[in-house]
Amino acid sequence: PCMICGAHPHQHDNLCASCLIDIPWSKSACSRCAEFIETIGLDGDHVCVNCLKEPPPYTKTVCAFDYLVPINGLVNQFKHQRNLAAGRLLTACLSQTVCAQITQGKITIPQLILPVPLHKRRLRQRGFNQAQFIATGISHSLNLAINTSLCHRVAYQAAQQGQTRQQRLEQMEGIFNIRQTEVDQRINSIAIVDDVMTTGATVQALSTALINAWDGPLDIQVWCIARAQPPNAWLEW
């Protein structure tokens, strides 16, 4: 059955045609950080005021969804209950979104995709790295190279829920270590893959660590299942 409404028959990846339309696909978003912005009457890519004032170290963010019902429930089932069927569904939707962006010329195809690593303690607790699961699926569907040993997380963190962006940024300082033996200087474009982007602190810290490890320019994209939006975004919309 469809994983959202339970209807039969479903399409591929346990999602029916109606739910495929109704789920909260990301739209009207900043091309750089994927935060909601008002884009009525505008054409092309749009960049929010925050990214214009203080550009992040990554150049593009591709999100399949806004982090709303029922996507948040599917992510939690996948991440915390190890519901791999939910993970396959979400991964397929992200692959579809990435393919569409490539076809439309909005993003370029990266040479490498890199899942956000978990600390070994968190990995033992959870039993798997959800970002690696997603990245592996995308690697297979888009025929892209993946590296799961380039970077590791050097410190364990408490859950970040409820923290401000500044608190998250401070907590993420120095959290990632790049293995120089895995660095290939011939690579100049990487897509970081994660499940949910909240404030962007995690991908900002990882992007900075990667750029510092490269001798030449490095273009970094962020690909994630969902983007958590500011509380007032839906009031504007």
Image (cartoon, rainbow, N blue to C red):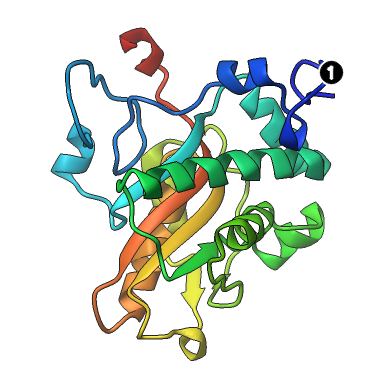
Rate crowding at label 1 as few (under 14), some (14 to 19) or many (20 or more) other CA atoms within 10 Å.
few
Q: Quadrant of the N terminus?
A: top right
Residue type at the position of mark 1: His
- Which quadrant of the figure has residue 153? bottom right
Residue lying at 35% horizontally and 61% vertically, measured from the top left: 220
Q: Quadrant of the C terminus?
A: top left
Residue furthest left as drawn: 53
In the image, 146 versus 199, the foreground residue is 146
Residue 173 seen in render: no
Residue lying at 69% horizontally and 56% vertically, measured from the top left: 133
Residue lying at 36% horizontally and 86% vertically, measured from the top left: 185
Residue 188 seen in render: yes
- Which quadrant of the figure has residue 157? bottom right
Q: Secondary structure at mark 1?
A: loop
- Which quadrant of the figure has residue 93? top right
Location of residue 214 in the rendering, given as x and y in whole percent from the top left corner: 32, 80
In the image, 205 versus 191, the foreground residue is 191
160 relative to 122 in the view: left or right: left
Location of residue 57 in the rendering, given as x and y in whole percent from the top left corner: 28, 58
Q: Would you place residue 21 above or below residue 57 in this image? A: above
54 relative to 99 in the view: left or right: left
Q: Would you place residue 111 above or below residue 90 in this image? A: below
In the image, 141 versus 67, the foreground residue is 141
Residue lying at 50% horizontally and 26% vertically, measured from the top left: 25
Location of residue 161 in the rendering, given as x and y in whole percent from the top left corner: 57, 36
Location of residue 86 in the rendering, given as x and y in whole percent from the top left corner: 75, 37
Q: Would you place residue 77 above or below residue 39 in this image? A: below
Q: Would you place residue 185 above or below residue 206 in this image? A: below
**Residue under label 1:** 8
